[in-house]
Image: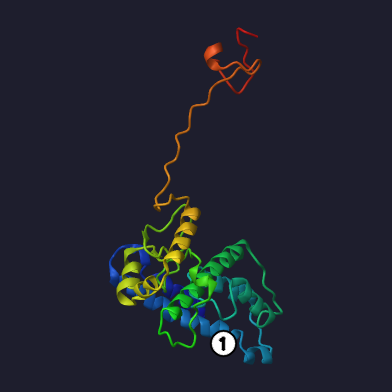
Amino acid sequence: SVLRKCVALMSLAPHVGDGRGMQPVMKHFAVKEFLTNMVEVVWAYILCGSTVTDLGIQVQARELIPVLRQLAMMDCIDRHWNQHGSWNDILDSLRSGCCSRSGIRRINADAVLERRSSELRSAINSMQCKLLDAGPSNHPFRMADAPQKWLYQLKCSEKGCSNIENIDNPHTLRCRKCWYFHWCSDACRTRSCDFSRQHELCCANTPTEKAEQTKAECCALFGWDEDGRKKKKKEREAPIKVCHGCGLREGDVGSPSATSAFVRCSHC
């Protein structure tokens, strides 16, 4: 019941990309963070907790899993996707615990959620490594040698946003200095740059060679040129008609009426 209320409440929250200024966006992130914390307690600490497992309490998967799928699609199930892992790991934990008797039937949406949750988890992990490395030099958990912090991530660089760019729809707002940060909306960029200063700290801590490496990876992914611009598509030349019998070109045999069927020319 709590999970269903969370789904209903999240559907009423303002959308990030609605273009109505910062106030709706701040409300969106506040509602999302609150609901995610609540949902995480319900499934991670209660349903997958030792008390439920030890007592053998069972939950009907046909009632629980569809609700969790909805919450996972809205990225309201795990703040960092690190309680049990990505979506498949969460399903495995539930199947071995409170849903062991009823079992969990996989559907096509689970493959999409697994891919999406893996991308979100990778991006969050990479950003956390960057923020730790940008902290004080005497910080005990500095991640100077972590390779994942330099890998280009598809998720919007705002911490609370779960928008993922793709080849067909790349984010238009992008830092041209470090090439790591990109945003899906002006509100996300403002929140990332002016409210948390995470972009300022991480960008200043990016070596030039790492920025060039990220730029090359980004340009290769989206098919951009060295300046980070879209390559102009070459105009397709009109196909030259050829005789299907002897192979003479159109200029020699006139204009055949069709090219998909056998055409006879005056030569053959």
**Direction right: furthest residue:** 101
Q: Which residue is drawn at 60% across and 79% down?
A: 84
> In x, y percent, where is residue 38?
48, 83
> In x, y percent, where is residue 238?
49, 27
Q: Can residue 72 be seen in this view?
A: no
Q: Which residue is drawn at 58% across and 21% down?
A: 259
> In x, y percent, where is residue 35?
45, 79
Relative side of 25 to 75, left or right: left
**Direction top: furthest residue:** 266
> In x, y percent, where is residue 242?
58, 19
Check disc 1: other Cα within 10 Å, few if <14, some if 14-19, many if 20+.
some
Q: Which of 250 and 77 is in front in this view?
A: 250
Q: Which of 243 and 61 is in front in this view?
A: 243
Q: Which of 117 and 146 is in front in this view?
A: 146
Q: Residue at x 42, y 81 (%)?
A: 34
- Find disc 1 in the rendering and name its residue: 45
The answer to whether residue 1 is above or below residue 213 is below
The answer to whether residue 208 is above or below residue 129 is above
Identity, as a three-letter code, of the amino acid under mark 1: Tyr
Instruction: Describe the element under mark 1 as helix, strand or loop.
Output: helix
Q: Can residue 86 be seen in this view?
A: yes
Q: Quadrant of residue 132?
A: bottom left
